[in-house]
Amino acid sequence: MRTTTGRPTRALFLLGVSAFALGALPAAAQSPQGGTVASGAARISQTARQSTIRQTSERAVIDWKSFDVGRTHRVVFDQPGKSSATLNRVNSVSKSVIQGSITAPGTVIIQNTAGVLFSKGAKLDVGGLVATSQTVDAARFQQGGGLSIGGGERPGARVVNEGEVTIGEKGLAALVGGNVENAGAIYARTGTVALASGTRTTIDLSGDGAIQIAVGGNPAEGGVVNSGLIDAGAGRVLLTAGDAASAIDSVINTTGVIRAGSSSGSGGRIELIGRGSGKVRIGGTVSASGATGGGSVAITGESVAVAGAARIGARGGQDGGTVRIGGDLRGKGPLRRADHVAIAEGAVITATGETGRGGSVVAWADGTTIFDGRIAAEGGAGGGLVETSGKFALAIGPMAAVSTGAGGTWLLDPRNVEIDNGGAAVSPGVNNPPDGPGIWTVDTNSLRQALNAGGNVVITTDADGTTPGNPGNSDGDIVFRRALNWTGSGDLTLLADGDVVFDASVSTKDGDFIATAGEDLRITNAIQSSGTGDLVLTAGEAIAIDADVRATGTGSIAMLARKGDIVGTWRPAGNLRVTTRSGDLDLEASQGSVILRRFNTSSGDNIQVFSDSGDLTVTAGYKIRIQGESTGGRWVRLGSSGSSGDVTLTAPTIKVFGGSADNTFAEVAAGEGGSITMNAETIWLRNGVSEGRVAALNRADLAMRAETQIWDGPVRAGTGGDNGGNVALSGAITALVEPLFGLAANRTFVLEPTTPGGAPSSYGSSVRLGVSTSGTGSIEIGAPVEAAQIALISQERVGIGAGAGLRATGAGDSLVVAAGRRFRNDAGTDALETTAGGARWLLYIDGFDGLVGAEPASGNFDLYGRLFADTPPSLVTYGGNRIIYGERPVLTITGETLDKTYGTAVTPGLTVAGLRPGDSLGTALATGPDVASDGAAATAAVGSYATDVTATPSDQGYRLDLVDGVLTVDPALLTITADDKSRIYGSANPPLTASYSGFVLGQDASVLGGSLTTTATQGSDAGRYTITGDTLTSRNYAITSTDGTMTVGKAALSVVANDASRPEGSANPPFTATISGFVLDQSIADLGGELAFATPATPTSPAGSYGITPEGLASRNYAITYVDGLLTVTPGGAQPQPQAPAPFGIAGAAERFERGVPPLTPGDATFRTTIAEAPPALADPFLLTYSLGDVVQYVPAASAAPAGADAQGFVPASGGLAEGGLAQGGSADCSGPINRAGSEAGCTRQTFAESFWTTRAEESQ
């Protein structure tokens, strides 16, 4: 036996429980007081005997000033359903005391940091209950999450149940705080009951509907006490607490009853877990019994004390259950291992199966186990298993009793066993040596027969091998003294507390061989499986391999040294083989090393550890060392070039060292279909005279991850052709030898940015680093790389991560990256660098969309149309760093499309589209481009002309697209304004003329087609006619014409009444007139109206002169002037005689109207005559009355006035030309006579066509 130091358990204990909905409760004196709904939807109503909380939201948070429930008071939570929850936060310095009843379909949570007490008589019937003296995270709760509980607890706060709590089916009852106690009764129907002492607790719903409870932290003076009843049906019970207040205190102490039993099915689960230095004391009943099968009970802590009154059971109506105290079987499994376990006299532990097999009971301690109670694990159909073990010491008291039943097993301290001829016969099942000192021998033949018959045989050293008065003289070894071989399917299991020693060989065919040594396992003779049997060799300390261990059939080999080394070094002579054919091969030294190195002096003795097609796994807690020696032929190979399995090495340090003589290489190898994975803190490959190498051959994958890697030996992915597999590297790598990374199609290479431990990776080498792949294979560089030459070739992708970069220190084309379809650069513009003078880097990318991230700053323009396969670096004639694209951009050069006006000259330009950033026409083209057009000259006629583009081919790699533009010559603007013209009706049109604006190039109207036109002809009526230039045309001018006017005036037509005479008393003769002025051969017939004459003379008119006035004619084309004639009426037929002038105002007098001054006011006015020579004026000699007909009436004066009187007045006519064509203000003789009528009647009427003036009229007799 060996002593060990127990490790502390996890700070958090997780328990899966059934799904439930979290809920809450309020608080006061005889009733809860001061309730306020903080969130959610709820309404509080209260009477003297009942408080009702009607909640309509799924969750609600209510703040209370106090939350007490008197004996006669009832609190009812009217919640939507059993999934509802109410969080009641009590803000009080006093604990909440619940004496009455609380009911709810859902969950009620009571938070009072001063404590919560359910006193005797209290009754709770709720879907779920959580009572805590710590703070609940309300926001997380209200958002639908679980409960996060912790902090805020007041000193001395406790959560205690002395009443009766009944939880709904699959609900949760949880008392949470630093100090919790159940002295009452808690009933949970197939639910979960948790008494949790800690500083932080979480209760989380999981996706499958279960709830997990995690408790952590160690409150000062905390603990869990159960003196009452906890009945979870077939559910689960958890009691957990942390450190004790003092070394003698128990943090979990149960003297009451804890049940998780079932009357119809299997028992539930009970866990009493002391965390940290927590001690657990059981003084009452703990039962997980069931009608069909027993449940499970787990009790552990730093120490466990089972008192004499304790009754712990996992009985089953069929099979028994399990009871684990202080640890699991043989100290394995996840259950915490106690340092000390004591089971006192009188204590009873049962895991019996009534009709089935007995269960199992384990009492384990890493230190000392003291057992003086009673354990029963019998079964109606077979015995169970009992282990009472102390890793340091086991004390069996005088009252100790164990009953395992028929075929059952009781494991305790070991006895030495040898396998040899002539020993005890064995049978299938567990074969324990009898108690007693000395060696117990097992007969080889008997063992072979049992195995060949298909029976499984277990040989242990589980017997008391001590001698009274001399404890500890038996090591518990198992030694093969005689060779054992069997071909049957029976499995042989050796369980030795001490060593397992192979002084003879072991050979199986189809049965498994399992040898477990508590101490060392020494292989000095061959162990072999030729069929399906597995070889499983385990040592608590070391394994020494000095003979072959082989599985030549389909079986696997597993070797585990828990604390010591696995060493393959000292075989006296011959090669050493640890191999499988198709099964897996595992070597693990959990806390030690795996060392494969030949120390014997024989030449040519090598070591091979491999599996033809299974996986090879080598794990060491300290190091793996594979090393050739100083004598030729003593090489070591882990894995095989012909192996298709995966080779995995894991250790803090992995060393692969070549020997100091020829053919003493050390190698880790894998072949097609396999892989090599190396995980370490340090990987060191070192060449001696022979290589220390890693070779992943024929498409085998390679992964090497370590904080530090030293490659003083080759690393190979492939054999030199493109047949390597995937490669993954991490760590600070120093490569002194050029690796070989020629990957097969579709394989990837990754230099990871960080190590598994989080340190940054890097790669540094004084030699070349070359990586190539094809197809969809990619290269990812996640860390800085520096090497003399770097060549990364991929058809798919090369990526450089943030903080990475490539730095080449050699000369020439020292850095070449052919990224294929994509180059991802997260490292910035300086990701690529060369340091030697004249050196350069070249980056090849298939297409422009293949550049993702920052573009490396080359300082030079890019090249196009050059794939890496067609244009390797030697054919790139441009100097300097370059980015080279396989894609050819299209450079579109387009002649300018422009307009110009006829008569102007232009120089067409061009536009360039498609130049990539950093490029120019100077980089893209050696000369040009040029553009020309026939329409560029000023004399080019109106029309469309091409702007032709010409250019030389692009050596940079552009594909040129030359596109002609269009030059449009637009007409010049020409404005033509036709001049106005006039003529008289009947005359020919005068020549038509115009003014011009807009002629270019010295041109004039002679370049125009057509002529000015008018609609007026010689025979056109008098009026206004258009003169237009719309008929003028020109190809090169856009003509805008402004019309002129042709005015056709009326022709003058004079109608002069011919004079006539008649005797007095006779009728007037027919009057005639002379008409002059007709044109175009027209006559009176072309006039309108009818010629008529008017005269004042009647047949009775006395002799005298009478006017003949012609009238009645009308014409639109003639201005007709009528001239009166004179009718002379002679007395008795006498001819009229001249008369003297009559006085002014008297008939027959000649009046003169002198020019006068118009009145000041327009409108009707009074005409007045004055005597110019002799003022004052006569009073009103004439009175003028004006009408729209321009007729002026002269009324005779009261008395005659002398001749020469002035007539002045105002006639507001419409303006225009006056009679005779005079302007206003002029004067002239009247063109018509002044009519007189009657003797001394004076002038009676005169027609005017003037305004603001007077006319001078002089009439002769």
Image: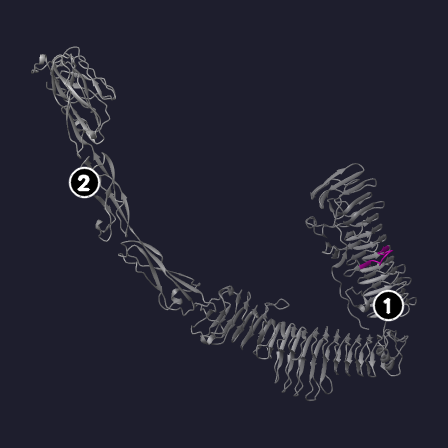
Q: Secondary structure at mark 2?
A: loop
Q: In the image, what residue type sits under mark 1?
A: Leu
CA distance for labels 2 and 1: 144 Å
Q: From this view, report whether residue 949 is shown above or below residue 578.
A: above
Q: Which residue is mark 1?
A: 385
Asked if disc 2 and disc 1 are in contact, CB closer than 8 Å, the reply is no
Q: Is residue 925 magenta?
A: no
Q: From this view, report whether residue 393 is shown above or below residue 1086.
A: below
Q: Secondary structure at mark 1?
A: strand
Label 2 or label 1, whichever comes before in sequence order = 1
Q: Position of residue 1083 (x, y in %)?
A: 18, 30
* Residue in the foreground of this view, choosing between 176 and 868: 868
Q: Which residue is mark 2?
A: 990
Q: Would you identify the image quadrant in which residue 651 lies?
A: bottom right
Q: Would you identify the image quadrant in which residue 719 lies?
A: bottom right
Q: In the image, what residue type sits under mark 2?
A: Pro
Report if residue 1041 is visible in the image: yes
Report if residue 460 is visible in the image: no
Q: From this view, report whether residue 888 is shown above or below residue 735.
A: above
Q: Is 862 on the left-hand or right-hand side of 796?
A: left
| Mark 2 or 1, closer to the camera | 2
Magenta-drawn segment = 257-272
Neighbor class of circle 2 (other Cα within 10 Å; few <14, some 14-19, many 20+) is: few
Per the rendering, the mark at residue 825 is: none
Q: From this view, report whether residue 1165 is shown above or below residue 598.
A: above
Q: Position of residue 873 (x, y in %)?
A: 47, 75
Q: Residue furthest top?
A: 1198
* Residue in the foreground of this view, choosing between 235 and 1168: 1168
Q: Quadrant of the C terminus?
A: top left
Q: Is residue 269 magenta?
A: yes
Count of all numbered marks drawn on residues in the image: 2
